[in-house]
Image (cartoon, rainbow, N blue to C red):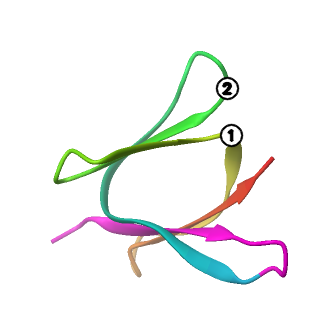
């Protein structure tokens, strides 16, 4: 499978699981990020992509 796991940086700079099995990340019209899992679960975040490793299936996000 090629889905990614999204992590959100907390105030201590540690990665916390945000959403598993992410299939889609897209910007919204209001400048946020919309993440959708292969199961249809959706989350929207006012933030940005801090790093992304496609080989390791990891996306690290930071909140604005």
* Percent coordinates x, y for residue 25 in the rendering: 43, 44
Residue 46: mark in rendering: 1
Q: Secondary structure at mark 1?
A: loop
Q: Is residue 27 above or below residue 37?
A: above
Q: Residues within 10 Å of mark 2 (few under 14, many from 20)?
A: few
**In which image quadrant can residue 33 be found?**
top right
Q: Foreground: 21 or 18? A: 18
Q: Is residue 11 above or below residue 47?
A: below
* Percent coordinates x, y for residue 9 in the rendering: 71, 71
Task: Find out whether the residues at labels 2 and 1 contact each other: C-beta distance under 8 Å.
Answer: yes
Residue beneath disc 2 = 31
Q: Residue at x 64, y 80 (%)?
A: 15
Q: CA distance from mark 2 to mark 1?
A: 7 Å
Q: Secondary structure at mark 2?
A: loop
**In which image quadrant can residue 57 be found?**
bottom left
* Percent coordinates x, y for residue 5 in the rendering: 40, 70
Q: Which residues are magenta?
A: 1-13
């Amino acid at each position: 499978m090629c889905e990614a796991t999204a992590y959100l940086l907390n105030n201590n700079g540690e990665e916390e699981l945000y959403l598993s099995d992410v299939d889609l990340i897209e910007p919204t019209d209001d400048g946020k990020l919309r993440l959708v899992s292969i199961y249809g679960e959706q989350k929207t975040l006012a933030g940005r992509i801090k790093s992304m490793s496609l080989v390791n299936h990891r996306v690290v996000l930071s909140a604005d």
